[in-house]
Image (cartoon, coloured by chain):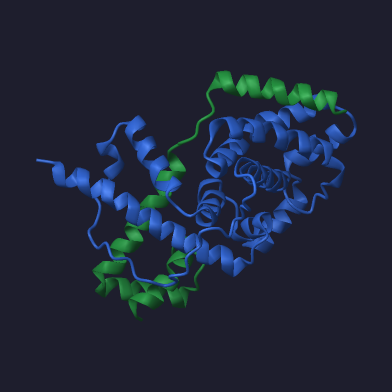
Amino acid sequence: MTCKEFLALLDDLIDDSVSDEMRTQLHAHLGGCEHCKVTLDTTRKTIEIYRSNEIYDLPSGLRDRLHAAIMARCKKGC
Amino acid sequence: MAIIQAIVDELEPHPDVALVERVRDGDVSAYDALVRKYEGQVFRIAQHITQNREDAEDVTQDAFLKAYQKLDQFQGNSKFSTWLVRIAVNESLMRLRKRRTGRMVSIDEDISTDEGSVPRDLADWAPNPEQNFNQAELAEILRKTIQGLPQGFRIVFVLRDVEGLSTEETAETLGLSIPAVKSRLLRARLQLRERLSRYFHQRKGAER
């Protein structure tokens, strides 16, 4: 397996949607390719960091104001 | 997996279904519960797409009002949350079009096709590189990094990886094919990874 072939299946490996046979082949490639191992590890970490850190939070004051505005408009729109 | 999930869904209807039914029967307080549940998510998505806080506030209001008005059109063959996210994405794109008058905005914008190129950056990251930054610094880095992505990549990454929609739901929401979603997701993940590497390496290199 070449790095390009590995890369084409990187997302499927991360999302755990590869067959057992394919997973074995991908791991065999990883065993001998530091480049792809680093790519896999840091891509996984990238996703995890974005999942676990809220970058656009909704402060409670704004949430309350928005909520009240939405409900007022919906009630009018009845 | 999808089949098992479908069977589970059939046996146990999603709690949103009961709330939607109550709203259809005229119970506005049930809609209040739905708004409370999803307003944070709709706001985040609107902010990611419009990149503007005021626009995101307006979009959040408009999306919930539109969903309320169109609730009769909600078929129930997709989840309420997915249906709502689709409305929020459309409202966000419309808001962008209004702001950039005369210029079409679509999720196909700025998509380059350097498909399958192998990442250049080889150096590994520290085990927990985010711990080298305080919360505010990290949030700023993450915001700047994701804002630099082409819009068509950014929306796919946000829906799929941040908001947890499936590939199929993301494709349906954006009106894209499944291969298009997969291709954009890969490019988005790799570009973000490469851009984050700069910050994490720099900091690591500065350590004594």
Q: Is residue A5 above or below residue B70?
A: below
Q: In the depicted view, which residue is nearer to us: B174 or B1?
A: B174
Q: Is residue A38 left or right of residue B22?
A: left
Q: Is residue B138 left or right of residue B95?
A: left
Q: Quadrant of the C terminus of chain A?
A: top right
Task: State whether residue B193 appears in this view.
Answer: yes
User: How many callouts does the rendering have?
Assistant: 0
Q: Quadrant of residue B170?
A: bottom right
Which residue: 67% across, 28% down?
B36
Q: What percent of the width, then of the height, locates residue B181? A: 57, 63
Question: Which residue is situated farthest in the bottom direction here?
Answer: A1
Task: State whether residue B127 appears in this view.
Answer: no
Q: Is residue B46 left or right of residue B134?
A: right
Q: In the depicted view, which residue is nearer to us: A11 or B201?
A: B201
Q: In the depicted view, which residue is nearer to us: A26 or B5?
A: A26
Q: Is residue A26 above or below residue B194?
A: below
Which residue: 24% across, 63% down?
B122
Q: What percent of the width, then of the height, locates residue A15? A: 49, 61
Image colour assigned to chain B: blue
Q: What percent of the width, then of the height, locates residue B112? A: 47, 65
Q: What percent of the width, then of the height, locates residue B4? A: 67, 60
Which residue: 28% across, 62% down?
A38
Image colour assigned to chain A: green
Question: Which residue is situated farthest in the left direction here?
Answer: B208
Which residue: 51% across, 56% down?
B153
Q: Is residue A56 left or right of residue A77?
A: left
